[in-house]
Amino acid sequence: MVKVKSKWVCQQCGYETPGYLGKCPDCSSWGTLTEEITAREAKNSSPKLNKLSDSPPQLLGDITLDESIRYKTGMTELDNVLGGGLVKGSLVLIGGDPGIGKSTISLQASGTLAKTGLKTLYASSEESGSQIKMRSERLGVDSENLYIQAETNIEEIQMGIDATSPDVVVIDSIQAVYSMNISSSTGSVSQVRECCSILMNLAKCKGITIILISHVTKDGVIAGPKVLEHMVDTVLYFEGDRYKSYRILRTMKNRFGSTNEIGIFNMENTGLTEVSNPSELFLSERTDAVTPGSVVIAVTEGARPILAEIQALVGATPYPSPRRVATGIGYNRVLQILAVLEKRVGLNLSKQDVYVNAVGGINTQEPSADLGVALAVATCARNVTVDPATVIIGEIGLSGEIRRVSSIEQKINEAQKLGFKKVIIPSSNLPVKNKPKNIEVIGVSRLIDAISKSITG
Ligand SMILES: Nc1ncnc2c1ncn2[C@@H]1O[C@H](COP(=O)(O)OP(=O)(O)OP(=O)(O)O)[C@@H](O)[C@H]1O
Ligand SMILES: [Mg+2]
C-alpha cells in the first residue's frame, strides 16, 4: 500500500516543511504555506536532469554559431521584446492577467511561425480543440504545420511532442498541466516546478523552443515558485488596462536580449495588431480646446519615447484632510511634487483636493514626467493654461531645481514628429545634439521659471 505523506509548501517561494507554519522562514510571507499530499513512492521520482549535450568540454573558439538560431514570429513588436526573435531551444514564459490576450498572442505567433515552415505544437490545457479552432478562425490563423493538442497531462504532451517533433511548442498554461509523478494537485508549486523541469529538459536536449503561458497572482507576479522564473530564459509580462484596447508586453528577464524593450499592441476583433506609433494612441483623444490643468509630457518606455497627456484637477476640499489621487503616475511622486510646489513656488494646496491622471491608461514611473505634473497642477490651481503645442520634460528636485533627464534627443524628435512647436526641457540637457529645425527648445533650471515660461494666459 502506498503510504500517504503530506508536506507544507510555500506557494510564493517553494519552501517545504513537514508541518504548518504561519510565516514562511525563507521568503517571510504570511499565510502562503499550503498542504500538499505526496505519495511516498513519488519521492525522488522526478526524472534526473538530462545532460544539456553529449559532447565533452569544448573550447569556446571551436563552438560554431548556428545562423538560424532565432525564429522570427512575424510580429515586429514581439520580436523586439524577445531581443530579435525566439531563440532556438529557449524557454519563454508569458505571464498576465486573465483575459489580457496571452492565448491570442501565442496562437497568432504560432500561426506565423508555422507559416514560415516551422512545425509548431499548440498544447492547450484550458481550451478544447474546437474552442481553439474558433479562435484561430477569428484570428485568421491557418497553417498545415500547426498542430493542436488539448491535453492537461504533461506526459501525454511529451508523447505528442515525440510524435510530431515540432520546432516550437506552446503550453497554455503551465498552471493547468500536471505530471503523474507528483500526487499534489494541479497548479501547486510542486506540480508547476516538475512540469517546468520536464519541459526545460526537452527544450535544452532537443533544441525545441517552448513558450509557457502562466497565470499571475492577485499581486501581479507570476503564480508559482520564484524558481520558475529562474528556470526559464525569458520572462515576459503582458499587461494593459482591462477597459482599454491596447496591451503592453514587457520583458522582466531575458538571457538573449535587453530587458528595456516593450511591445505595444492593440486588441481588435481580428486579434492583436502592432502599434508602431504609441504617442498617437495616447494623444488620440486630446481636444484642441485649451484647458487649465492639461499638459503633454514625454517619457521613455523601454527604449522608445512616448508622448502622453497629464490632466490635473484642483478644487476646494469638503473633507477635513484634502484628498490626493494619482492615476497612471506614482502616488508618492505626486505627493513630493505637491510639496515642492507649496514650498518653492508658494502654491497653497493645503485646503485643496488634487487629482492627477495620466490620460489613455499609460502608467509611467519616469521622473521626466515630474515637470508636466507640476505644471498641470499649478495651471489648474491658478486657472491659466499651457500652450497646447508645447511638450513639457523635466525631473524636479526637492529644492525646486529642474534636473537632467535621459534620452532627450529622442523625446524632442518624437514631439517634432507629432507636430508640436515647442519643448521645455532642463537647461542642464542643453545644448541638444541634432535638434530638429522646426521646433523651439527652451531650457529651464528652476520650477518657478518653468511655470512662467510655459503659461499662456
Ligand atoms: N470576438 C472577440 N472580439 C474581440 N475581442 C475578443 C473577442 N474574443 C475575445 N476577445 C478579446 O480577447 C481577450 C481574451 O484573450 P485570451 O483568451 O487570449 O486571453 P488570455 O490571457 O489567454 O486569458 P486566460 O488567462 O483566461 O486564458 C478578451 O478579453 C477580449 O479582449
Ligand atoms: Mg488563455
Image (spheres, grey):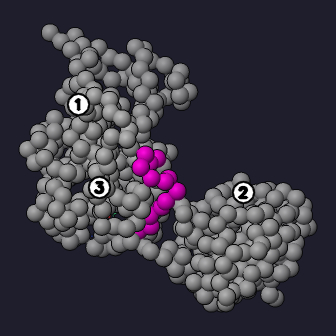
Amino acid under label 1? Answer: Asp
Amino acid under label 2? Answer: Arg
Q: Element at badge 3?
A: helix
Q: What residue span does the magenta drawing correspond to? A: 253-267
Q: Element at badge 1?
A: loop
Mark 3–mark 2 CB contact (< 8 Å): no
In the rendered image, residue 265 lying in the magenta stretch gets the answer yes
Q: CA distance from mark 1 to mark 2?
A: 54 Å
Question: Disc 3 or disc 2, which is closer to the eye?
Answer: 3
Q: Is mark 1 within 8 Å of ligand 2?
A: no
Q: CA distance from mark 3 to mark 2?
A: 47 Å
Q: Is residue 430 above or below residue 88?
A: below
Q: Give the mark, 3 or 1, whose residue is nearer the N terminus.
A: 1
Q: Which mark is residue 67?
A: 3
Crowdedness of circle 3 by 10 Å Cα count: few (<14), some, many (20+)?
Answer: few
Q: Please state if 20 lies on the left or on the right of 453 as rendered.
A: left
Q: Position of residue 169 (x, y in %)?
A: 22, 49
